[in-house]
Image (cartoon, grey):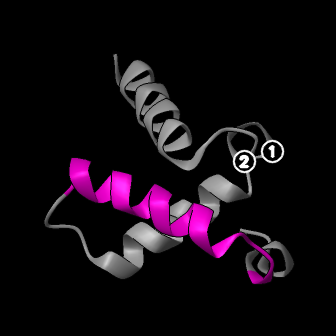
């Protein structure tokens, strides 16, 4: 992750995104979910989406890549 970008992110967007990821992985470490949400924020395409939709899109991409 670009450390400079990690310093500048929408806290609400990241929190909502992490909350959506937590629904998928309820036992995951909260810090890891927040770090993942910040990574999603660094993706320009995902950042343009509402946070819940961005998380869903990222999850969809991951499941498609595994198929």
- For this orientation, the residue located farthest to the right is 4
Q: Is residue 65 left or right of residue 14?
A: left
Residue in front for this viewpoint, 8 or 64: 8
Residue beneath the point at 80% across and 45% down: 44
Q: Residues within 10 Å of mark 1 (few under 14, many from 20)?
A: few
Q: Quadrant of the N terminus?
A: bottom right
Q: Which residue is mark 1?
A: 44
Tell me whether the residue at label 2 lies in contact with that at label 1, contact meaning CB atoms closer than 8 angstroms.
yes
Q: Is residue 46 left or right of residue 58?
A: right
Residue beneath the point at 61% across and 42% down: 50
Majority secondary structure in the magenta region: helix
Q: Is residue 16 magenta?
A: yes
Where's residue 31, x and y in %? 39, 81
Residue 10 disc label: none
Q: Quadrant of the C terminus?
A: top left
Q: In this picture, is 27 found above or below 30?
A: above
Q: Residues within 10 Å of mark 2 (few under 14, many from 20)?
A: many
Q: Is residue 33 left or right of residue 5?
A: left
Residue range in magenta is 7-25
Residue beneath the point at 47% across and 60% down: 16
Q: In this picture, is 46 found above or below 8?
A: above
Residue beneath the point at 32% across and 77% down: 30
Query: What is the total number of numbered labels drawn onto the structure image?
Result: 2
Residue 47 disc label: 2
Q: Secondary structure at mark 2?
A: helix
Residue in front for this viewpoint, 58 or 2: 58
Where's residue 5, x and y in %? 82, 72
Q: Is residue 10 magenta?
A: yes
Q: Is residue 39 left or right of residue 60?
A: right
Q: In this picture, is 47 found above or below 66?
A: below
Where's residue 36, x and y in %? 50, 63
């Amino acid at each position: 992750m670009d450390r400079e970008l990690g310093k500048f992110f929408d806290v609400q967007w990241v929190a909502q995104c992490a909350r959506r990821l937590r629904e998928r992985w309820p036992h995951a470490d909260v810090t890891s979910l927040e770090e993942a949400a910040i990574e999603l924020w660094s993706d320009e395409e995902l950042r343009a989406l509402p946070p819940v939709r961005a998380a869903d899109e990222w999850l969809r991409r991951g499941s498609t890549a595994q198929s």
